[in-house]
Image: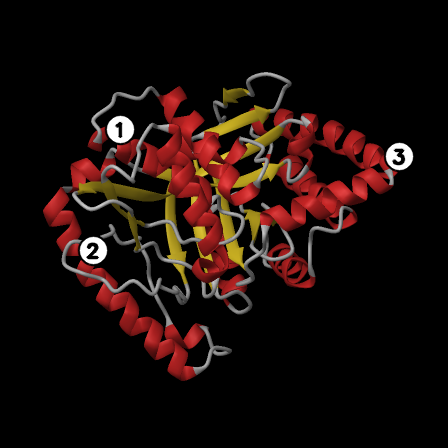
Amino acid sequence: ARDVQTGLPGCCWSSVSATESCFAVPAPTTSSMSEYASADHAQEVTRDLSARQEESAQRVRQERIGAACLKRTRAFGKLILFGEHFVVYKAPALVGAVAAYTDCDVEFTGAPGIEVVDLRPAVPGYKVEKAAEGEEAVKIVLSHLGVDTEKRGAKITFGGSLTAVSGIGASAAQVVSLARALSAALPRTLSEEEVNAAGYEGEKGYHGTPSGVDNTAATYGGVLRFQRTDGAPLFTMKKLAGPIRIVYASTGITASTTKVVGDVKAKKEADEAWFGSLLARYTALAAKGEAALDAGDMAALGRLLDENHALCQELTVSCKELDDLVVAARGAGAVGAKMSGTGRGGLMLALTPTAESQAAVAKALEKLAPQVWMTTFA
């Protein structure tokens, strides 16, 4: 997979100042300040300065630790093609990992406690909104892997190219990368299954009862079919008939997965017949989507993505901002478009069969969205 980010990065950095010991590999991006006309000019300048300061810190961190070492801690973001919310109730989901990643390094210190330096690029407000959940997630992973920070402290630095935004699986990428970094720092050899398990535990800090799909995509990458069971989840790596070109865009709205999932659960419990009907329709839709994916039938896949978005609207997890982006993408030539992830903000994606249509859809979405990316599943 490969990612290209277009438009203004719009990154919001944590309150922790960049130091010479902290570096994150920069995302392959191109920026255009003029595309983001709705932003306040002073905020734009502040963000641009912050980004340049972080880039300076990034170079030093790479030199200190080494690109090869950081590469071994990478965990990927993801886009859900089919399965938002229904996957929680043991329906199958189809998910593709994007090329953008989070990486991590861990240093054990003499003093007890945890210090977290978060250098990940993020949409405005994301890190503030997710701060408490992120702190809990880090503690869970440390505990799961037997690290007692009362006996020896840990300085944990997160970086990488994945922009933290609702819907991309940023929390899963964070905790999976932490598990990989702890494996190197302890040192303790962890299998991919053990890394994935640690990531699942960490996701509980963010989501309470996670589906497991995000940490699985973050760990293994690729395109996969995922399904929860009463026991261990089942997942299969998919072999694609050809490249799948995607444009995805952010609403700029950070949503709480815990709250949205909780709302869906409450609606389900209030009207089991209504939810059961939606679930049955989704299950049939997902089977057709997988068949189209396997056959490389982009036209059919696009129509089914449109249908999945309509189901998300009925489930009340879409919003005007997502719907507007979906309509714009279809109008610019996407063969299908839908929200992706938690919903009520976050991301949408558009299926674009050719490089030309991918570029055209990205250009159209840049007029509405603060961040737009292109990726290819292959």
- At label 3, which amino acid type do we have? Ala
Q: Residue 91 is drawn in which quadrant?
A: top right
* Closest to the observer, 31 or 278: 278
Name the amino acid type tagged 2.
Answer: Gln
Q: Using a 10 Å C-alpha cutoff, classify the residue at mark 1 as few (fewer than 14 neighbours), some (14 to 19) or many (20 or more).
A: some
Relative vertical location of residue 211 with respect to residue 117 in this rendering, above or below: above
- Which secondary structure lies at badge 1? helix
Q: Residues within 10 Å of mark 3 (few under 14, many from 20)?
A: few
Q: Nearer the viewer, residue 128 or 333?
A: 128
- Residue 45 vs residue 17: left or right? right
Lower position in the chain sequence, tag 2 or tag 3:
2
Residue 272 in the image: state x and y as whole percent.
85, 35
| Residue at far top of view | 231
Q: Amino acid at mark 1?
A: Ser
Could you say which is closer to the camera, residue 139 or residue 84? Answer: 139
Task: Give how far apart the Cα atoms at labels 1 and 2 are.
Answer: 22 Å
Q: What x and y, as percent, mark residue 62?
A: 16, 48
Residue 129 position (above or below residue 1)? below
Q: Earlier in the sequence, mark 1 or mark 2?
A: 2
Q: What residue would you read off at disc 2?
A: 58
Q: Which quadrant holds residue 70?
A: top left
Q: Which of the numbered marks, if any, corresponds to residue 183?
A: 1
* Residue 273 numbered tag: 3
Q: Residue at x 59, y 59 (%)?
A: 332
